[in-house]
Image (cartoon, rainbow, N blue to C red):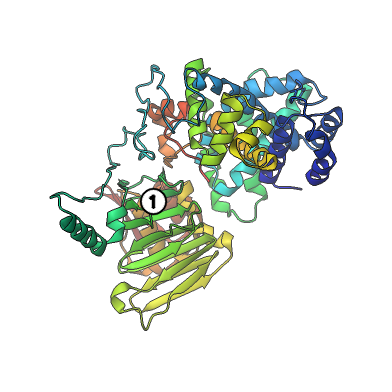
Amino acid sequence: MFGTNRRHLSPTRKLAHPPTRIAVKVAAVDDSLNSWFAREVLVHEGALMRYLLRTWFRREEIHDLRQDIYVRVYEAAAKSRPTMPKSFMFTTARHLMTDRLRRGRVVSIEAVGDIDALNVLIDELTPERQLSSRQELRRLSEALDRLPDRCREVVWLRKVEDLSQKEVAARMGISEKTVEKQVAKGARLIADHVHGGTVVRRVRPDDVKGAQNEDADEDGHGQQPGD
Amino acid sequence: MASSREIERTAAAWLARRDAGHWSERDQARLNAWLDVATAHRVAFIRLDASWQRSDRLKALGAGLRPDGVPARGSWPSPRSGNVDAPAPVPALRHAPPTRSASCSHRHVVGRRRTPSRALFGGLAIATLMILATLALGWRHYTAVEQASYRTAIGDVQELPLVDGSTATLSSDSQILVTMSRGERHVDLQRGEAFFVVAKDPSRPFVVSANGRRAIAVGTRFAVRREDDAVRVVVTEGVVRLEPKSQSGGSHQATTLLPAGSVALAGDSGVVVHSESVLQAMEYLSWRNGFLSFHDTPLASAVAEFNRYNTRKIVIGDTTIGSMRVGGNFRWANTDAFVRLLEQGFPIRAERAHGDIVLYRR
């Protein structure tokens, strides 16, 4: 699909006029729902990921599980916005995990006895703080520093020096297609760190109480993508 | 339906395409069509878009810098915040060992930089001799840039980012010594078990040694565990090369290639490899998520597993019950639940004595 797009568009790209960035709405749907979702739901991704990592047995399914949770929260919010988005998201997470455990062939019945472990009190999870702008900048710069060299350079030139992708390509002596690919990669990696504050896990169920480390987790420093 | 990761990649590709400029109404219509296919597409895109827009704030980092190239990692002035755990800026060491979790006293990190010692006494001949000597002593030591040692206490599992981008997940009561040099990434498993997600770097093989065995990977996921005199290797992605014991001369024991799904037990007498599905192999590694998986496992082995993770030990007080078979997934931190299930499902009773749990036949 992309290939055809690109071929179709390549003549246009060669035009000399400076790249105009159009302020585009994410979609035709209610844009405020999207920003609500980013503001009220995605902001808790770090807490959600810690919760999932602590409770969910198959780590390779967590990405998928997170997607399902977001889909369900988004679709519910499209009908009516939950008043307590964070609790709503965790309740959704718990339901989805319970469903999966009950449906799953692979997890044997003993694990269902463990389903109580899913009933983590929401209160036990650290309340998400609004990051101060300095903290936010720090988290962003950590995200930047975690990128592989070339990707980091592309993101730097694009975001800090504000060059267009085309100018980045010229500066680095690489193709525009490569720049685009690095932007895609950078966007994904940055999202994981910025939303999730990717976590070094201490897999200790009784560690829920050990909130002294949670502060560190909130800021996401010293942490590395999980899988 | 595409997997969530595939969807995320496609969403990222759209985002990057839009970011490239020359974005027409038609492009937007196409993107909208893709977003309308499934809510999963939409949430993936919103998520990436939100953080990509937020990273416009990175521009603040460029303030006051001459626009000549990208500054080194960590060269940002560290904004002071109320957080005592704020990481120190690490401009000098390109890769600093993780400094977080200073609160975990049981984990100590030693990072030191080795520099080649040369020309100490001056004189070309001596210098040359010294360099030759160093070469002879071992290129690995000569080029070693960094060493770090990590240890976990009983009942503690930790995931550690390594400086090369790999991660090591250290199981309970385990210890590794990591040496990163130009030619090799070397992990000495000194105790217990560790799981590795190896960053690809064809020029620097990733070697894990334990009990005289070397397991070598270039970019893969695998776990190595010490068991008395043997070494167990579980591969869940890629291929690992298991080398024979160095003392054995290497002539009569062949090198073993272990594809994903392999569970190899290498002892003095040779290597036994079980080829299983990757999912089955992963069950050997469910400790990473806080679980232990048993399938038709003798109770004695299951108990030994639990004891790896807990200071409060389970003791088999009656040898006849050791051969009973148990199955299921259990939280390794929840010994009580395990014992309770044993009492419910088997003719077993448990006695708590001196902090241990002793199992008897009922």
Q: Residue at x 12, y 50 (%)?
A: B121
Q: Relative to A87, is B194 on the left or the right?
A: left
Q: Relative to B239, is A39 on the left or the right?
A: right
Indicate the chain on which mark 1 is placed.
B
- In this rendering, is residue A153 above or below B331? above
Q: Amino acid at mark 1?
A: Ser
Q: Residue at x 85, y 27 (%)?
A: B25
Residue B52 x %, y %: 63, 28
Residue B61 x %, y %: 50, 22
Residue B321 in view here: no
Residue B43 x %, y %: 71, 32
At mark 1, the secondary structure is loop
- In this rendering, is residue B190 above or below A14? below
Q: Residue at x 65, y 55 (%)?
A: A105
Residue B162 x %, y %: 41, 46
Residue at the left extreme? B121
Q: Determine the image quadrant of residue A183.
A: top right
Disc 1 residue crowd, few under 14, some 14–19, many 20+, Cα 10 Å: many
Q: Residue at x 28, y 75 (%)?
A: B247
Give B144 or B54, whichever is nearer the viewer.
Answer: B144
Q: Which residue is mark 1?
A: B171
- In this rendering, is residue A59 above or below A43? below
